[in-house]
Image (tube, grey):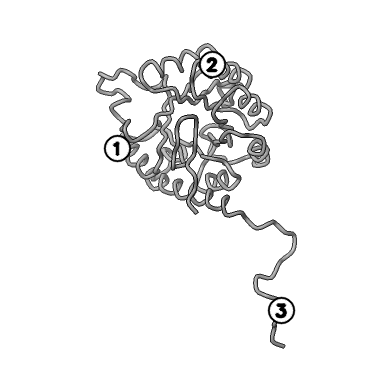
Amino acid sequence: MKDAPLAIGEHTFSSRLWVGTGKYSDPETGRQALEASGAEVVTVAVRRVNLDRDAEDSFFNTIDLNRYTLLPNTAGCYNVKDAIRTAMLAREVGMGSLLKLEVIGDPKTLYPDNQATLEAAEVLVKEGFTVLPYVSDDLITCMKLQDAGCAAVMPLGAPIGSGLGIRNPISIRLILEAMQVPVIVDAGVGTASDAALAMELGCDAVLMNTAIAGAKAPVLMAKAMRLAVEAGRAAYRAGRIPRKLYATASSPLTGLID
């Protein structure tokens, strides 16, 4: 009955809920929500935090690095050059080589530029990064990223921060069938049922930020998301019954009393 840990490159994790650190009303709420989520992986936008370890508001003073694994991301990058530079900066300041790669193609939808993401991934894999690319839910792009040596793929469920949930479950299922590396849904989750659905489809993990930080009660939502991910994963492992057009009696049809 015990689930195997999630393996990403050299890392293994028990929790399959990954969370972000931004958009909280205050640091204490963020700390409590992170704890309630049970997450082991925490992503941070390298270009949006203070990386000076000596500064009072340094990001490194806000998180227990002995407890959480950092997943620096290249959010805010719109071309290959900036994404590679940001990744190098993250490793230089001690954030490690585990990397969420983002190369945005459109400022309105924040959809990723899949071609630029692939180009940046090919460079960063050769530079020794464990690359986890944020991409659209496109099967061919995910296959190319896997072939390029990425340790996982992170297709969006819906646009970043939209809360629309998994818009194209069939696309996610096709990606899952084709991948030999983990598939982590990233972006678009709005509530616990969205996270459960992603896991029921067979995704290996879910990454979210706004769904928790933007909730009316972020700490309570973090707990709900943890339970949803656990339930969805258990349901996937258990194996759902087939869908049928007509009813099937739930009690035996033999031995009935006339």
Task: Provide residue 244's location: percent of width, then percent of height.
Answer: 72, 59
Residue at (40% x, 31% y) in the render: 22
The disc at residue 219 is none
Task: Provide residue 248's location: percent of width, then percent of height.
Answer: 71, 67
Q: Quadrant of residue 141?
A: top right
Pointers 3 and 1 in contact (C-beta within 8 Å): no
Residue at (55% x, 20% y) in the render: 103
Q: Tell me the amino acid under the disc marked 2.
A: Lys
Secondary structure beneath dot 3 equals loop
How many C-alpha atoms fall within 10 Å of the one at disc 3: few (<14), some, or many (≥20)?
few
The residue beneath circle 1 is 28
Q: Is residue 207 above or below residue 200?
A: above
The residue beneath circle 3 is 254
Going from the N terminus, do you reach mark 3 or mark 1 first? 1
As measured in the structure, the alpha-carbon distance from the residue carrying label 2 to the one carrying label 1 is 39 Å
Query: Which quadrant holds the C terminus?
Result: bottom right
As measured in the structure, the alpha-carbon distance from the residue carrying label 3 to the one carrying label 1 is 61 Å
For marks 2 and 1, give the one nearer the viewer.
Answer: 2
As measured in the structure, the alpha-carbon distance from the residue carrying label 3 to the one carrying label 2 is 65 Å
The residue beneath circle 2 is 126
Q: Tell me the amino acid under the disc marked 1.
A: Glu
How many C-alpha atoms fall within 10 Å of the one at disc 2: few (<14), some, or many (≥20)?
few
Q: Is residue 76 above or below residue 21?
A: above
